[in-house]
Image (cartoon, rainbow, N blue to C red):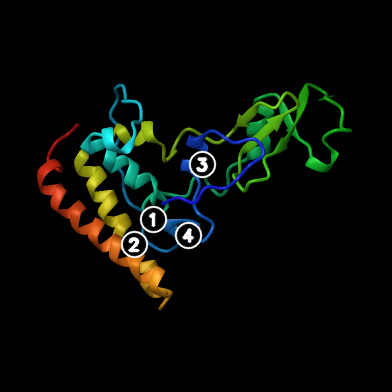
Amino acid sequence: EEEEEEEAEPVDWTLRRLARPRREPSCCTQRWAPVELQALSSGETIAPKPRELRSAKQSLVAKLLCRWWYVLPDWPPPDFDYVAALAERGYREVPVSDFETAEEMDGNLRKAFALPNGYKGLYRDEQGAVIDVRPVEGRPSYDQLMCRSNAELHKLLLLAYGRQLEVLESEGNGGEAEKALQQQLRTELSQAKNSLFKFGSKAG
């Protein structure tokens, strides 16, 4: 399960969901060959639901979002220009230490500071509003993944489980907690393989 961090002013949970735990690989494409994704289909998506009320497809997406960095390209891209993206929104970045004394406007750009939580591309303005300049394209989010087929989601999830286990096993003996996690992942991998036969052929 994802580890929650305490913040003075909590960021929306969808922003958390997209962030990788700090101990995980920085990007799957740095260790494995990139996965070729199918073109996204159009259509409305269903709002996220509590675990006990999720459909089979929603459960697939939820599990994949917990380990997307094992199969999807790094996001935001390493070469993404945050300064330019922030300027397009009418803002400029000011260090937190200088924020209170900095002028509100510099030319036509308002001041904003980067959120000190490790999430690149997230800023806060003087009114306290969060500014998210990360690109929509390639975003590993619920709405984007719900547009993909059950078969593709299963493929991605099985690959993600396998790669997560590969990383854990390569790290050696991490104690009883690590062994328990590996066993849990093997069980979930087996369950995912079994469910593939039931749901994998469905397009929706």
Question: Measuring 43% from the left and 74% from the top, which residue is drawn there?
Answer: 174
Depicted 57 relative to depicted 182: above or below? above
| Relative side of 166 to 120, left or right | left
Assign a secondary structure to mark 2: helix
In front: mark 2 or mark 3? 3
Q: For this rendering, which residue is in front, 134 or 50?
A: 50
Q: For this rendering, which residue is in front, 59 or 28?
A: 59
Report the Cα–Cα distance between label 2 and label 3. Answer: 22 Å
Report the Cα–Cα distance between label 3 and label 4. Answer: 15 Å
Assign a secondary structure to mark 1: helix
Contact, CB < 8 Å: mark 2 with mark 1?
A: yes
- Which quarter of the figure is the C terminus placed in? top left
| Relative side of 195 to 142, left or right | left
Q: Earlier in the sequence, mark 3 or mark 4?
A: 3
Q: Earlier in the sequence, mark 3 or mark 1?
A: 3
- Asked whether the viewer can see residue 97, the reply is yes
Residue type of the residue flagged with mark 3:
Arg
Residue type of the residue flagged with mark 4:
Glu
The quadrant where residue 108 appears: top right
Q: Residue at label 1?
A: 70
Q: Residue at label 3?
A: 16
Q: Residues within 10 Å of mark 3 (few under 14, many from 20)?
A: some
Residue type of the residue flagged with mark 1:
Tyr
Depicted 131 relative to depicted 117: above or below? above
Residue 113 point in image, percent of width and height: 73, 36
Q: Residues within 10 Å of mark 1 (few under 14, many from 20)?
A: many
Report the Cα–Cα distance between label 1 and label 4. Answer: 9 Å
In front: mark 3 or mark 4? 3
Q: Residue at label 4?
A: 24
Residue 163, labelled with which disc? 2
Report the Cα–Cα distance between label 3 and label 1. Answer: 17 Å
Contact, CB < 8 Å: mark 2 with mark 3?
A: no
